[in-house]
Amino acid sequence: MELYQLSAHKLHEMLVNKEINSREVTESVLKRIEQVEDRIHAFITLTPELAMQQAALADAHIQKGNAGPLTGIPLAIKDLICTRGVRTTCGSHILENFIPAYDATVIEKLKEAGAVIVGKANMDEFAMGSSTENSFFGPTRNPWDMERIPGGSSGGSAAAVAADECIVSLGSDTGGSIRQPASCCGVVGVKPTYGRVSRYGLVAFSSSLDQIGPFSKDVKDAALLLQAICGHDFRDSTSANVPVPDFTKALADNIRGMVLGIPKECFREGLDPEVESAFREAIRTLEKLGAKTVETSLPHSEYALAVYYIIAPAEASSNLARYDGVKYGFRAKGSFDLMEMYKETRSQGFGAEVKRRIMLGTYALSAGYYEAYYRKAAEVRTLVRQDFEKAFAKCDVLLTPTAPTPAFKLGEKVDDPLQMYLSDIFTIPCNLAGLPGLSIPCGFSKQGLPIGLQILANHFQEEKMLDAAYAYEQNTEHHLRKPAL
Ligand code: GLN
């Protein structure tokens, strides 16, 4: 076993027992990056010097006996979370050379926890996409099959964990961007409740949907990383002032009597038969562990994708108005006046998908169309949320497949936005309702591609979904399989 293969909780044990130090762990991870990164391309920016400095700092803390669970643990950060002094590109040409003057709250928290940052992970431009092919810096490859996408938009964060190029990582999820890549790459990914994690310093895509969350090799690591980044933050007005439970305490490996809701709508057209059979097998496993299942219904989830593609582009068109070449980021050369400079900067600085969303969003918000599109979408969003309220009156957690298919081929859907959007059919309703959701490996296709199980819980009930996921993981072996690199 190499150190880079281990989980954060295992490494923590070895660190506090002084069997190893953080410098060794970090060197091991950096060596692994050297071995595989030119094939995977999980990172936009690597920070080996910063990592070694933070490792030395962590070792000093461990020596003094004040090591937390993440002290000395190497991790990767999706490149839309601001890191002071380290460029933060959002996968975009327009922010290619943007170096933030401050740290996001989650980064402050991770630094305080003594974590080690090895680099900034690749992503679809401004988190718009499901394949990481929309990155200005080129796509990331799936460690299980280099011809395939790692999912997206947090594809770099997911692939880095799957390829052991970091121990854990952070991503963001607006419509599935943590859970869908976790599913494609065979790792655990958690989207917390809206408001659970501060988004101060997260570059905004769709502000009523965005959340930051962890990727990890197992459920316990996800719980530990979530713990480290949670909590109220006065700098984010949507941050919830609610108590943060001890998430690892919830991991009891006992789900006897837990009620699992199975929405009947998830057996729908487009669901790959291998995904369906892995999903049904996962339900049987959980039943054998003592959980009960009930059929539930989310009748309005049928409209969730359409609602999302009004709301998310509308908010994005407003959020992305700030990239005009004036204060920071890329500025097109050779313009004669201000209007031309704006136009050229935005035409050259944004990629095709981002432009498509800005146009869709601007249209949906324009006078005369606002009522027909944006307001209507907001109303249907309420119906989607009410469906969940009714469902959670009958069950503790809801189960669905995470994605309708395993990872598809690079290039397969780039020219067909609607097909690409359909990758998020199971993940989007949860964002519209502000709920927490998680993806955990639940099997492999015949071709050896990972398949993910999605577990959803009610607002601020992350413990229940972590508990269910942990029990499932402790009694199955999917998470132990590794890609051959
Ligand atoms: N794939 C979805 C989109 O393209 C979701 C992205 C996300 O969650 N950031 O918008």
Image: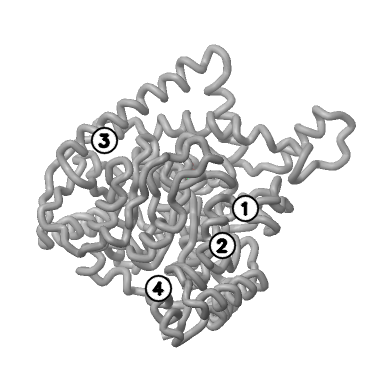
Q: What's the residue type where badge 2 is placed? A: Lys
**First-in-chain label (4 vs 3):** 4
Alpha carbon distance from label 2 to label 4: 19 Å
Residue 272 seen by the camera: no
Alpha carbon distance from label 1 to label 4: 26 Å
- Neighbourhood count class around disc 4 (C-alpha, 10 Å): few under 14, some 14–19, many 20 upward: some
Say whether marks 2 and 3 touch (CB < 8 Å).
Answer: no
Task: Describe residue 208's horizontal placement relative to residue 393 as left or right.
Answer: right
Mark 1, residue position: 103
Colouring method of the image: one colour
Q: What's the residue type where badge 3 is placed? A: Phe
Task: Describe residue 297's horizontal placement relative to residue 64 as left or right.
Answer: left
Mark 4, residue position: 7
**First-in-chain label (2 vs 1):** 1
Q: Residue at x 46, y 21 (%)?
A: 373
The CB of the residue at mark 4 lies under 8 Å from ligand 1: no
